[in-house]
Each structure stands twice: as structure tokens, then as C-alpha cells.
Image (cartoon, rainbow, N blue to C red):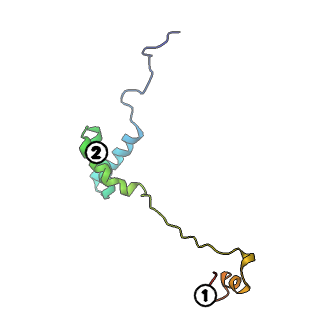
Amino acid sequence: MEHGGKRERAGRPKGAVSKNKIALDEIKKEIEEGKQLAPVAVMVWIMNKSLEEGKYDITLDAASKAAPYLHAKLVESKAEITQMKRPDQMTDEELHYVAGHSTTSVDTE
């Protein structure tokens, strides 16, 4: 058995269509037929088309503009923790307040 080199019928067949190409063609067809003119779809179409044509500056611009609509933005969240006494250190009045049975505020310090 030979090692290395080109092997017959190895690799992707010439003219094979990728899933991305099929999806791009569907979006392009919908845009041309006027069925889908959503701005995000247009930006994605422009991004893919310019990438195919090697126009990377246009690709980057379209990708930057489409990204906020396609990917969630991470948001900083804050948590405020109030230190409380352990239940065995609380008075009956404080326990009642914590349990939600009282409408008056109790100083826990």
C-alpha cells in the first residue's frame, strides 16, 4: 500500500455545494423576490457575498453591524448581599419580620 501523495476520489468533490452556500442562496432568492428584506438578513447576505469576493473591509463592516442582532451581549450584573443574623441569634420580633408577617421595620443590629 502506498503512503502519502494524492489519492483518487479523496476530498470534497468538485462543484459540491456546502450548507452555507445553500442557506446563502435561499436568503439571496428571498431578498430578490422581496419576501425577506429584514435588515439583519441583508447584512448577513452582504457579509457572506463580500467574503466570497475577497472584499474583507466590507465583510468586516457588515459583520460588525450584524453581530449585535445575532449574538447576545454579556451584561455585568450586581448582587447586593445583606448580612443577617443566624435564626438562633434573632429575637422573636426579628424572626417574624424576616418571615414576612410584619409590616414594620426592625433594626437587626
The amino acid at mark 1 is Ser
Q: Residues within 10 Å of mark 1 (few under 14, many from 20)?
A: few
Q: Residues within 10 Å of mark 2 (few under 14, many from 20)?
A: many
Examine the rendered structure and indicate whether residue 93 appears above or below residue 53: below
Residue indicated by mark 2: 59
Instruction: Return the residue nearer the eye: 96 or 28.
Output: 96
The amino acid at mark 2 is Thr
Instruction: Return the residue nearer the eye: 97 or 44.
Output: 97
Q: Is residue 35 visible?
A: no
Task: Please state if 73 lies on the left or on the right of 2 as rendered.
Answer: left
Residue furthest front in the image: 109
Image spot of residue 52 (x, y percent): 29, 38
Residue indicated by mark 1: 105
Find residue 101 and report its image quarter. Answer: bottom right
Find residue 49 and report its image quarter. Answer: top left
Instruction: Return the residue nearer the eye: 108 or 105.
Output: 108
- Residue at (73% x, 85% y) in the render: 92
Q: Tell me the element at label 2.
A: helix
Looking at the image, do the residues carrying marks 2 and 1 touch, with CB atoms under 8 Å apart? no
Image spot of residue 13 (x, y percent): 40, 26
Examine the rendered structure and indicate whether residue 19 appears above or below residue 5: below
Question: Which of disc 1 and disc 2 is earlier in sequence?
Answer: 2
